[in-house]
Amino acid sequence: MNVKGMMSNHKLTRSAADMSFFEFRRQLEYKAKAKGVSIVVADMWFPSSKLYNLCGTRADEMTLDVRAQVCVNCNFQHDRDVNAAINLRSYALADVQ
């Protein structure tokens, strides 16, 4: 997450400051280490919601208000959040192997 960018947005400043992302990540890494689980961190610029999981086509532009989009290549309607979750799962599994 781009915390610095969120802090510059006057509508998100208080929420971003209250979240304590560093502490959340520290706790997550601590708990994962204790359980013997690895954490995979995707690059900030990984196109998780712009990359269609079925065909691999990448959308050129997608504003944050777009919640679903039809792929021009495979004609499948992708929900933005579900598509991003599938892509991040695939990214993590490819990184582990």
Image (cartoon, rainbow, N blue to C red):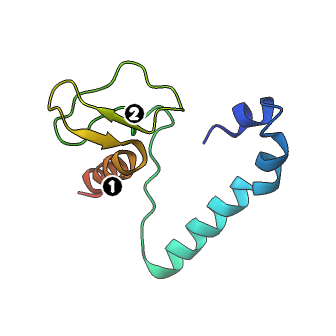
For disc 1, the marked residue is 89
Which circle's residue, 2 or 1, is located before the other in the chain?
2
Residue 48, x across and y down, in percent? 39, 39
Q: Residue at the spot x=79%, y=49% of the render? A: 15
Residue 87, x across and y down, in percent? 32, 46
Residue 90, x across and y down, in percent? 28, 51
Q: Quadrant of the C terminus?
A: bottom left
Q: Secondary structure at mark 2?
A: loop
Which amino acid does the dot numbered 1 rest on?
Arg
Please determine whether, in this image, residue 40 is positioned above or below residue 87.
below
Please determine whether, in this image, residue 84 is positioned above or below residue 25.
above
Query: Is residue 21 shown left or right of residue 73?
Result: right
Q: Quadrant of the N terminus?
A: top right
Query: Is residue 58 shown left or right of residue 11?
Result: left
For disc 2, the marked residue is 47
Please determine whether, in this image, residue 25 is positioned above or below residue 68.
below
Q: Residue furthest top?
A: 60
Q: Residues within 10 Å of mark 2 (few under 14, many from 20)?
A: some
Q: Residue at the spot x=42%, y=66% of the render? A: 38
Residue 55 falls in which quadrant of the image? top left
Q: Residue at the spot x=34%, y=46% of the render? A: 83
Q: Nearer the viewer, residue 61 or 43?
A: 61
Q: Secondary structure at mark 1?
A: helix
Which amino acid does the dot numbered 2 rest on?
Pro
Number of marks in the image? 2
Q: Nearer the viewer, residue 85 or 29?
A: 85
Between the C-alphas of marks 2 and 1, the distance is 13 Å
